[in-house]
Image (cartoon, helix red, strand yellow):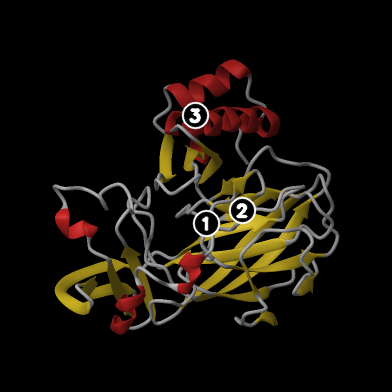
Amino acid sequence: MKRVVRNPDSLKYVLDHHHSPLLEVETGEPFILETEDAPSATYRTPEDAAHLLDAWYLNSSPPMANPVTGPVYIRGAEPGDTLVVEIEKLELDNQSVTYWRPGHKPLGDSARWRELSTPTFAIGRHEKGEVVLDEAVTWEEGQVRRHPLDLRFPQSPFIGTIALAPEREVTTPGLGQGSWGGNMDVRDIRPGTRILIPCYHPGALLYVGDVHACQGDTEFYGTAMETRSAVTLRCNLIKGKSKPFVRLEKPESLISLACAKPLEEAVWRASIQLMEWLMEDYGCSQRAAYLLIGVNPGFRVNVYQMAPIASLQYTAGAEILTKSIPGYR
């Protein structure tokens, strides 16, 4: 099976259609991408707490964080097509890390929450399907300090950043978001979900990174359990039919995504685009689509990402259970 090995040449800090592909694959052909964690492997041991304020990747603006692996050229993909990405497997590293530093919102500068103004990270051990946090590590008065924890969370891995090369602009995988994907931190982008992304260039030019071992909704303080991974994917195409934004097909539901600020704008866009999907593909009238999202208990809104980081927008998903769609097949 074709594989891109994690190394400095495989990791990208911009999404740019001028990048030479690392790999070419046929539609339906499985391949593996090795990804790096969001802080670019900076925080791997407790002693790395000394670099919570002066890590090398913070010296750029925007920071050289959130690397992605790619691009991958999918033969036959053309502008105006939709790329369908299927995640066959997410293999995690044996550890992950979460962190914050002064200035991280929403509580990094709070007088009430003084502990949270201290540069902090926690390394999670991956053990028997769980993420285990034994301690938080802080950098205080020039010293590494350890604070016991006893926290366990189920592993629920997903891809935080998945994107095709944007049509014209060049953007970072940390702050970039658009119809072509980007850093959306959607917990439903995981094995079993089909990801539909509009193509803007020959070969589609797929980038993947920022895998999370687990995360709560909204990614409240801006980082999840960030981890390295090996991701097995395969891609197919819907020829000559583009989507307005990224869409997800789960076994039991459809999800229309949107990124915007304020949050209600993201919710409205996702919901209206879901209505359009129901009309175009499932024959719903405008009235029926409106009713399906207004009074149907099988409709819900997910707030995947609401981290107040620079220009990053909020990610919402309008989701409907397929069993509630008349004539769904």
**Residue 53, image x, y percentages:** 35, 68
| Whether residue 123 is situated above or below residue 197 in the rendered picture | below
Q: Residues within 10 Å of mark 3 (few under 14, many from 20)?
A: some
The reply to whether the C-beta atoms of the residues labelled 2 and 1 are less than 8 Å apart is yes
User: Which one is in front, 250 or 178?
Assistant: 178
> Which residue matches tag 3?
265
How far from the left and from the top, in percent, is residue 77? Answer: 82, 56
Circle 1 sits in a helix, a strand or a loop, which is it? loop
As drawn, 312 above or below 62: above
Image point (55%, 58%), residue name: 161
Residue at x 31% of width, y 67% of height: 154
Helix, strand, or loop for circle 2? strand
Task: Select label 2 or label 3 by which is in front.
Answer: 3
The residue at which mark 1 appears reads as 189
Camera-nearest residue between 221 and 251: 221
Describe residue 307's horizontal placement relative to residue 243 as left or right: left
Residue 125 visible within the image: no
- Among the 4 quarters of the image, the one containing residue 19: bottom right
> Separation of disc 2 and disc 1 at Cα?
7 Å
**Disc 2 marks which residue?**
195
Residue at 72% over, 58% down: 16
> What residue type is disc 2 on?
Ile
